[in-house]
Image (cartoon, rainbow, N blue to C red):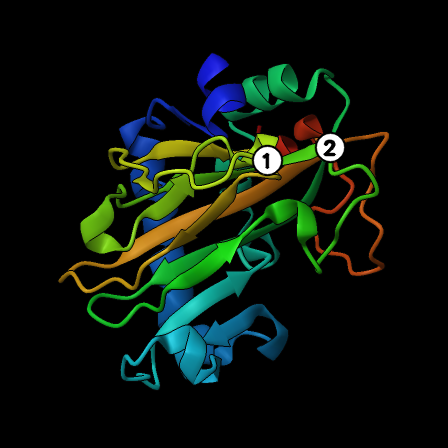
Amino acid sequence: MRRFHCQGYAILPPLPAALRRRLGAALDALLARAATLPADMVTWERDLSPRQRQGLPAPGDAVFLLGDPCRADPVFAKGFAHPALVAAATELLGTPELRCHFTNATIKAARCGNGIAWHRDALNRYMPTARGAFLRAMICLDGMEAANGGTAFRPGTQHGAEGATEVVARCPPGGIVLIHPRVLHGGAPNLSARSRRNLIVQWGRADDPPLSEARESLTGLSPAEVLALGGG
């Protein structure tokens, strides 16, 4: 994982194709009934500010974020606690005692998905931790590149580097991007003709729990407990 420590991010090989298709189908099913889901689970593109929309039209029926998807379908646990992802988190965080903080599906809809401003996950307002001993992983169901609003990084900024050159992560469908909590990253709008669906999970050390009282269905669970929800 040398790249992770040097660049602030790393890309793991794709999930098995059958699992990726299953997760994609489950997400599409939730998106199709998003209007019937609890309001606190769904953030629509129309809910975002003009600054976030970056001048793009705000379609009324496009979902930007679907929070805590396991609350609606436990199959997502199979992705969030996939053994390859958990093994990488265990190595990078230096302990097998991991706990899930939160999960979501972040969607950049075709031709209108909004951009995401430059930020560091260590400065989260939602479920931050005292030491920032966590990492975030993105399962890129559709793959990711500049054309579909792929996440861009400024490598080295997790170490305080200035003026780092922007690099857009490229990964195949099902690829997993691991993100250092202190690296600067963001993303352009999706102007392509295809959607960009990412499943997001934040894993942290058990000895550095979230400070926030906000909880989701997987908050505080170990990898084994999360995986069991999805049927092992």
Q: Disc 2 marks which residue?
A: 133
| Closer to us: 228 or 150 | 150
**Up-down: is 86 above or below 71?**
above
| Tag of residue 27 | none
Residue displayed at 42% across by 68% down: 64
Q: Is residue 229 visible?
A: no
Say which element carries label 2: loop
Say which element carries label 1: loop
| Closer to us: 209 or 21 | 209
Residue displayed at 52% across by 72% down: 42
Q: Kindly report which numbered mark, 1 or 2, lies closer to the viewer in this rendering.
A: 1
Q: Disc 1 marks which residue?
A: 160
Residue 184 % position (x, y): 51, 45
Residue 39 % position (x, y): 59, 79
Q: Is residue 126 visible?
A: yes
Residue 77 % position (x, y): 55, 40
Residue displayed at 45% across by 26% down: 7
Identify the amino acid type marked 1. Answer: Gly
Q: CA distance from mark 1 to mark 2?
A: 17 Å
**Up-down: is 93 above or below 60?**
above
